[in-house]
Image (cartoon, grey):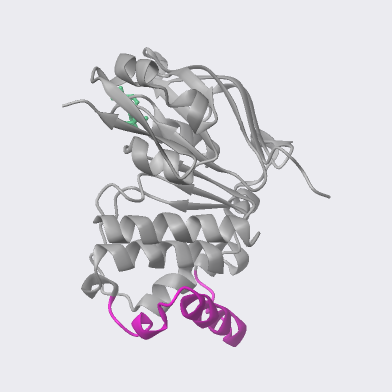
Amino acid sequence: MEVNPIIEVEGLSFSYNGGEKVLDNVSFELHKGEILGVLGPNGAGKTTLLKILLGILRGTGTVKVLGTDISSIPPKRLAKIIGYVPQEHHIVFPYKVIDYVLMGRAPHHGMFSLPSRKDYDKAYRVLDDLGLGSLADKAITEISGGQFQLVLIARTLVQEARILLMDEPVSHLDISNAVKTMSLIRKLVEEERILGAMVTLHDPLMASLYCDKILLLNKGRVETYGSPREALNPERLSQVYGVDFDIIKYNNRYILVPII
Ligand code: ADP
């Protein structure tokens, strides 16, 4: 059965330890075939929102994943549906890339059982698909940040995740690797290898180039939610970031540039 929207959030609020609301009445939907860009200044609540969708934190309001309330999805099942690419990675152990990617199979057979021949085949196939085959035997600590980002995406594909959540996947990448990463997410959505993706971004340019919808958060509230054309208008962005923006048209997309 096909469920759409694949993520549905309605009136979501959250505060840490009974403090001030970090998310306040947030509503949006992620539809099949979409990349949703989540923007907002530091502290806006983007990471907290992702943590709620991963089942790590629980707020008030409605959060549905593939049509089911997140509170009634067992953690192991949620881990199979949602693939998460975190913002910070402190990898100290020099795992081989192939072994690291194989960890994506953990929700399928438990952390401590050995991967099967089939799991290995799958992991090698995904690495080859993403043009990373030559990295398979390299140590994870010895590849570049851009390559590591792609390896993290490979891991979610090996996991057979249906929805991808990514926390600032391109913030620390050069423009070539940023484009490579975002283009890969686009391709995965277009080829229906994943149902959809939610990506937190800092750069309005990347957001307007790659995202179908934008959720702009400010101090935990939805400043705007809609198409890049609707959501990323100069007035709204200036209000949120305190910088003036101009708008230019490029390839039928509207791009915002800060006025300096
Ligand atoms: P963003 O990802 O948009 O930068 P976050 O979701 O990380 O925003 O943070 C939103 C707000 O919640 C910030 O004010 C931050 O200080 C606060 N916050 C984040 N994590 C915690 C925590 N573990 N305990 C208390 N407050 C937190």
In the picture, the quarter occupied by the C terminus is top left
Where is residue 40? Give x, y as percent.
36, 27
Residue 188 seen anywhere in this rendered image of the structure: yes
Give the image quarter of residue 39.
top left
> Relative to residue 249, is residue 33 drawn left or right?
right
At a point 29% along the width and 63% down the height, the residue shown is: 146
Percent across and percent down for residue 5 are 70, 37
Tell me the residue at 36%/15% (across/down).
Answer: 235
- Tell which of 39 and 47 is nearer to you: 39
Residue at position x 43%, y 26% from top? 232
State yes or no: residue 116 in magenta.
yes
- Residues 204 and 86: in front is 204
* Picture coordinates of residue 83, whole percent (x, y): 52, 54
- Looking at the image, residue 7 lies above or below residue 98: above
- Horizontally, is 88 left or right of 159 in the view? left
Instruction: Tell which quarter ligand 1 is in.
Output: top left
Q: How many marks?
A: 0
- In the displayed structure, 149 sits above or below 3; it is below
Whether 133 is among the magenta residues is yes
Q: Residue furthest right?
A: 1
Residue 200: in sight, yes or no? no
The residue under the point 63% across, 62% down is 191
Q: Quick check: 133 left or right of 80?
A: left
Q: Which residues are drawn in magenta? A: 112-139
Pick the residue in front: 249 or 207: 249
Q: Quadrant of residue 199?
A: top left
Give the image location of residue 168, x and y in percent: 35, 44
